[in-house]
Amino acid sequence: MGTKKDPLLNDREIAAWFRVNYSTVGKWRVGQSQAAARARRKPAFKAVAETLGVSLPDQAAVPRSLVLAFGKAVGYLNEQGEIIPEVQELSRRWQPIYPTIDPVSREDGKPRLRLYSKHVCARYGISNAWLDVLKANDEEFPASQTDELGRVFWYEEQLEAWDEVLDRRRREKEAGPAPHGYDSQGRPYRYLSRVTEVADGVESSTGRAYRLLPADSYWASYRPHNAASKDS
């Protein structure tokens, strides 16, 4: 039994499906002019085809499966391939209503979600201005991606990694100042703050006395990146 053929859709058929102008689909298929100083953006359908590792036919038509993947990726279609009605009510410079679905699934086979600025701000309860601050100044904040229409987004797994960073920072704050060092057994310590304190050891490199932190402290299970063990 043969495999089911993937039908080709022309610009008018795609425009009717997505409820957009015929000319809009033409831009997705062949690209659009950019300012002279800017590089011409790759046509959207071509970008999706390259992501999926498939080729486009040499005619003014696009395989339906590729159009479906594009619609899910940029926010026109939901996971079932149905049009998202709210899209029609948005202005020209719209962002997807809901997180969108990347053409390539995650390693576990689940949909790989794309979250745009509005979704990221809602997830963390921050403003667009604060998001810009994070992007510009926080080295651990994940780098953004650009979709087939030139809009910025982040993959869900990038934000999951950011969640871990935030959790680590929270636990560090609750644990108090980072230790001054770790002894040869990997135990964290801080220098004595008062002459009346009983020392647990002396740092060989500086001769400074220190107290060990409790074995169940946060710093005993997590070592800062710039912390090195020192012989006592």
Image (cartoon, helix red, strand yellow):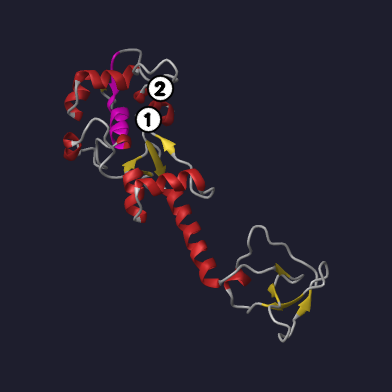
Residue at screen point 21% across, 33% down: 91
Residue 156 horizontal side relative to residue 77, left or right: right
Tell me which residue sits at (31%, 31%) in the image.
70
Residue topped by disc 1: 150
* Residue at numbered disc 2: 41
Q: Is residue 22 above or below residue 177?
A: above
Judge whether residue 15 can be spotted in this image.
yes
Amino acid carrying label 1: it is: Gly
Q: Residue at x 70, y 81 (%)?
A: 194
**Does residue 1 appear in the picture of this structure?**
no
Vertical comparison of 16 with 128: above or below = above
C-alpha gap between disc 2 and disc 1: 8 Å
Relative to 211, is 30 above or below?
above
Ranked by sequence position, the earlier of labels 2 and 1 is: 2
133 to the left or right of 220:
left
Crowdedness of circle 2 by 10 Å Cα count: few (<14), some, many (20+)?
some
